[in-house]
Structure formats: structure tokens, C-alpha cells
Image (tube, rainbow, N blue to C red):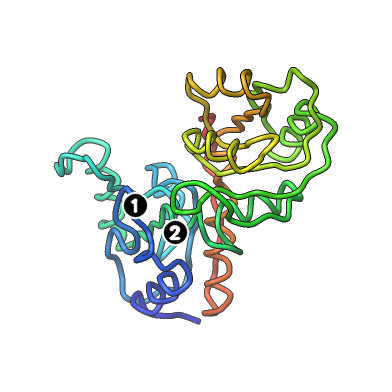
Amino acid sequence: MSTTRQELLAHFDGLLQPERFKDYGPNGLQVEGRGEIRRIVSGVTASRALIEAAIEAQADAVFVHHGLFWRGMDGRITGWLKERIRLLLAHDINLFAYHLPLDAHPQWGNNAQLGVQLGLEGQAAFGEQNLGWMAAAEFADAAALGRHVEQVLGRTPVCVGGERLRPIRRVAWCTGGAQGFFEAAIAAGADAFITGEISEPQAHLARETGVAFLAAGHHATERYGAPALAGQVASELGLEHRFIEIDNPA
């Protein structure tokens, strides 16, 4: 089966409602390709490696969380950006990218899907644009939570602030680079906060408040939303879908 580019865009927009968000770049169709869509490839970031893999897979469309265009870019299409766009245009592949809308979707988004992976039944509860999630939990302490995160995500998280052996009864999380949400998580009553990255201030806050901070990797925490949502839309429209993992240690 196949669908049109516009129908596919309408399905993505209908689920993700990008108009609701103040974001760092354009959501939706970022690069226009062929009008008929049969096969979608999903991935985390519109890197050259993902685009080349999508070409190999004979994809008509690529669906990602991190697209090509961000606020503050100077607008010149040169170097690495030119090469990524050249490959998409040369092979007539559509690029769809959704940033905060994909983080926020209550069922198929990055935060919802990370919760599924970790066995946490949560919901949006705090932070800017209500992007932070919270759930009840039962972990003996931050070290036990850290071991669980490592087992699920396949990488050892940076864990700070668990030295007091405080029981973990409420876990907050926000995928990717959401270290700035830590204070809001503390205020919301979290015993631990999981995100992708850590910056210098969070270590001090974790030690001073006793709320554990776990940085489990930007890519590692955000590799579940894109395949979940693209897979759902592909199923609704009768399209082929494949998630392609491009490893990233960040």
C-alpha cells in the first residue's frame, strides 16, 4: 500500500499537534521528496549515516526527532548540512522531524516510551511546557535505580546525589538534554530524576538536596519515541516501517 506525502504529514501533525509548542526549530516536513510514500525509516537524528542507511533501505520518507534546522543557525547550506540535504534531494526522500511534540506525546512520545522501557507508569507532571514526567516507584535507593536504568538502556548512567541511601518512591524524568528541569523535578517531589545529560550545577543540587540525578545518555533516552510513533502511523496507513539505530555515545 501507499499514501501521499500530504496525507502522511497530516497524520503526523494530527498525532503530534506541533502548533501547541514553542520549539527550537521547525516541526513537520523539513525536506520535500517524492509525493508517493510506501516505506518509512525512523531514527533519532537526521545524520548522514541515517540518511545513507535510508537510501540503502529504499525509503520514501525519514522520520526523526532531531532534524536539520535549529533556531540560531545562520542559514547557509554548506559543509555537512549541504551534504545531508544533497543526499535527500538526490534520492527524492522526504524528511519529517518533530522535536518537543515527539517528546510530549502521551502514548508514543519519548518520555512515554522511556517510561514503558523502565516499567514506570507515569504522566506529564512538571517543567516547561509540562514536558517532565513523574511516576511512583519502588527502589531501595539511587544505586538500585541506576542498576535498573543500566540494564534497560545498556549503558551505565552518571549518578549523583544518591549517597544518603534514600528510598526512591517517586521518579521524575525527561529525555535528552533536560538537565535544566532538575529544579522543577525537585519542587514536584521527586526522589530521583532521569535525563540524558548533566551539567555542572546539577551535581551540586543533587548532593545538597539528596535527590538523585541520573544522566543516562541523550541518544539512549530518546531512541524509543521515533520508532513507536512512526510505526503506529505506518500501521494505520498500511506502510512499511523500519527503525534504524545509529549508535551515539552522547
**Residue at image coords 44%, 59%:** 101
Q: Secondary structure at mark 2?
A: helix
Instruction: Give the amino acid type for the residue marked by disc 2 in the picture.
Output: Pro
**Residue at image coords 55%, 17%:** 204
**Residue at image coords 28%, 48%:** 69
Please tell me the numbered disc located at residue 101: 2
Q: Position of residue 2 (x, y in %)?
A: 46, 80
From the viewer's perspective, is 242 left or right of 189?
Answer: left
C-alpha span from label 1 to label 2: 9 Å
**Residue at image coords 48%, 23%:** 199
Q: Tell me which numbered mark, 1 or 2, is placed earlier along the sequence.
A: 1
Above or below, 75 relative to 227: above
Please tell me the numbered disc located at residue 247: none
Q: Position of residue 211 (x, y in %)?
A: 66, 29
* Mark 1 neighbour class, 10 Å CA radius: few under 14, some 14 to 19, many 20 or more: some
Above or below, 171 relative to 240: above
Q: Position of residue 203 (x, y in %)?
A: 56, 19
* Mark 2 neighbour class, 10 Å CA radius: few under 14, some 14 to 19, many 20 or more: many
Residue located beneath label 1 in the image = 23
From the viewer's perspective, is 61 left or right of 216?
Answer: left
Instruction: Give the amino acid type for the residue marked by disc 1 in the picture.
Output: Asp
Q: Are marks 1 and 2 in contact (CB under 8 Å)?
A: yes
In this view, the residue in front, 58 or 84, is: 84
Quarter of image, res 116: bottom right
In this view, the residue in front, 65 or 143, is: 143
